[in-house]
Amino acid sequence: QVQLVESGGGLVQAGGSLRLSCAASGIIFSIRAMGWYRQAPGKQRELVATISSSGNTNYADFVQGRFTISRDNAKNTVYLQMNSLKPEDTAVYYCKIITVQYWGQGTQVTVSS
């Protein structure tokens, strides 16, 4: 069965960096497009970035130039490098297989001002 386990969140000051990881199992990871999403308190979940099976990436405007999504197919893992963090980036971050309706537990990112 599909399993996604996010990690790497934490508390960081504004301007700092974090690297999120998402380990996938139960799928043929290398052929799957993956995405990172986030949900802030009281807000809807929103798409942050996606990466195709061939490594093509897309980003939401609000993270363009600050966040980088990448993948390591040998480790069945997708990453989100987050730099120049802002308080408004505070949210629970989730990874997702684009075509599968399944969510992991997420990882909390808190950015203090």
Image: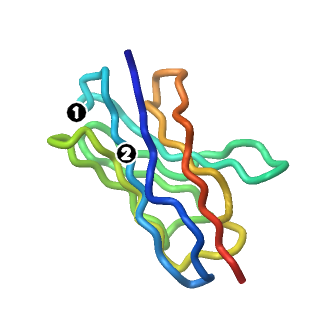
Of the numbered discs in the image, which one, if any, rests on residue 106? none
Q: Residue furthest left?
A: 74
Q: Residue at x 68, y 63 (%)?
A: 90
**Residue plotted at (39% across, 45% down):** 22
Residue with the mark numbered 1: 30
Write the residue at 32% across / 48% down.
56
Q: Mark 1 packing: few (<14 Cα in 10 Å), some, or many (20+)?
A: some
Which secondary structure, mark 1? helix
Residue beneath disc 2: 51
Q: Are marks 1 and 2 in contact (CB under 8 Å)?
A: no
Image side of residue 101 versus residue 1, left or right? right
State the residue at coordinates (54%, 21%).
101
Which image quadrant is residue 13 in?
Answer: bottom right
Residue sitting at the far top: 1
x, y percent for residue 38: 62, 49
- Name the residue nearer the viewer: 18 or 82: 18
Mark 2 is surrounded, within 10 Å at the Cα level, by few (under 14), some (14 to 19) or many (20 or more) other residues, namely: many
Residue 103: image location, x then y, percent = 55, 30
Mark 2 residue element: strand
Going by the image, does 83 lie left or right of 113?
left
Could you give the CA–CA distance between mark 1 and mark 2, rounded to whole angstroms? Answer: 11 Å
Q: Earlier in the sequence, mark 1 or mark 2?
A: 1
Q: Amino acid at mark 2?
A: Ile
Is the residue 60 above or below the residue 12 in the image? above
Residue 92: horizontal and vertical position, in percent? Answer: 63, 51
Left or right placement of residue 23 versus residue 95 in this view: left
Quadrant of the image for the N terminus?
top left
